[in-house]
């Protein structure tokens, strides 16, 4: 075998190894991805699913709600409270991300929002942080507000100089949220931000996907937390629209 043939063989071997490693990483992430519960799956049947977004369309929608899921959480996992928003008259678009990680495509909202569509944007956990980053750089003409579920804005997503209404919702039994970072990051939000707490709820309860690693056991049912999330969001949305 000539030196050139050896180099080619080595190159192809390296590429094959890399492809296998990438494939294994994808499988590992899929295994770790939090899947929707049966009730969330059932609620998701009312939605339309395309490559970039899961849409719960409301009749005579008052305002569009763009939502970024938490890291490694399947979009359908939020269907229970999202369906309640749609029933209340708000079209909801749950954005899809590569490997279910909003950090890999934080500007994905551009692909799902129309040029004249008025909307609010928010997210859960990592998705909330990325939604804040998007809102910080987005054209504010059609953006009407930002909401954070068990999430906080970082310096890249600072909204403290913005006039946008902001809602921040946490849960008292959240064992995943970094509470010290959450408190420290309040400086990046407007002074008139609305802060609400769901008593007895936990981190995973902002969706319906079972227990999340590191979370505390909730003192309320998932159905109750879903209802409270929907109630708080609808109340806030009514103030905007």
Image: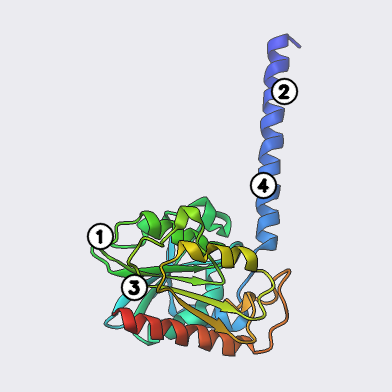
Task: Give the label, 4 or 1, closer to the camera.
Answer: 1
Measure the C-alpha gap from mark 1 to mark 2: 50 Å
- Contact? badges 1 and 2 (CB < 8 Å): no
Residue 178 is at least partly visible in this image: no
Measure the C-alpha gap from mark 3 to mark 1: 13 Å
Task: Give the label, 2 or 3, closer to the camera.
Answer: 3
Q: For label 4, count other residues whose C-alpha is less than 10 Å away and answer few (under 14), some (14-19) or many (20+).
A: few
Instruction: Compare marks 1 and 2 and give the one earlier in the sequence.
Output: 2
- Contact? badges 2 and 3 (CB < 8 Å): no
**Residue placed under numbered mark 2 in the picture:** 10
* Whether residue 54 is situated above or below residue 100 in the rendered picture: below
Measure the C-alpha gap from mark 4 to mark 1: 37 Å
The residue drawn where x is 25% and y is 62% is 141
Task: Give the label, 4 or 3, closer to the camera.
Answer: 3
45 sits left or right of 74 in the view: left
Q: Can you tell which mark lies on residue 115?
A: 1
């Amino acid at each position: 075998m000539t030196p050139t043939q050896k180099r080619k063989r080595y190159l192809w071997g390296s590429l094959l190894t890399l492809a296998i490693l990438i494939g294994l990483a994808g499988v590992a992430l899929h295994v770790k991805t939090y899947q929707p519960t049966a009730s969330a799956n059932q609620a998701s049947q009312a939605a339309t699913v395309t490559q970039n977004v899961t849409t719960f369309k409301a009749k005579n929608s008052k305002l569009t709600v763009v939502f970024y899921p938490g890291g490694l959480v399947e979009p359908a996992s939020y269907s229970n409270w999202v369906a309640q928003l749609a029933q209340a008259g708000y079209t909801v678009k749950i954005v899809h991300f590569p490997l279910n990680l909003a950090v890999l495509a934080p500007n994905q909202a551009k692909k799902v929002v129309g040029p004249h569509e008025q909307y609010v944007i928010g997210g859960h956990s990592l998705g909330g942080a990325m939604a804040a980053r998007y809102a910080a750089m987005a054209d504010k003409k059609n953006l009407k507000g930002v909401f954070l579920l068990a999430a906080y804005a970082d310096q890249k997503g600072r909204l403290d100089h913005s006039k946008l209404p902001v809602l921040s919702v946490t849960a008292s039994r959240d064992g995943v949220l970094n509470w010290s970072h959450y408190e420290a990051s309040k400086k990046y939000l407007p002074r008139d931000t609305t802060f609400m707490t769901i008593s007895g709820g936990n981190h995973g309860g902002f969706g319906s996907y079972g227990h999340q690693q590191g979370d505390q056991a909730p003192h309320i049912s998932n159905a109750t937390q879903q209802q409270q999330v929907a109630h708080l969001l609808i109340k806030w949305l009514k103030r905007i629209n």
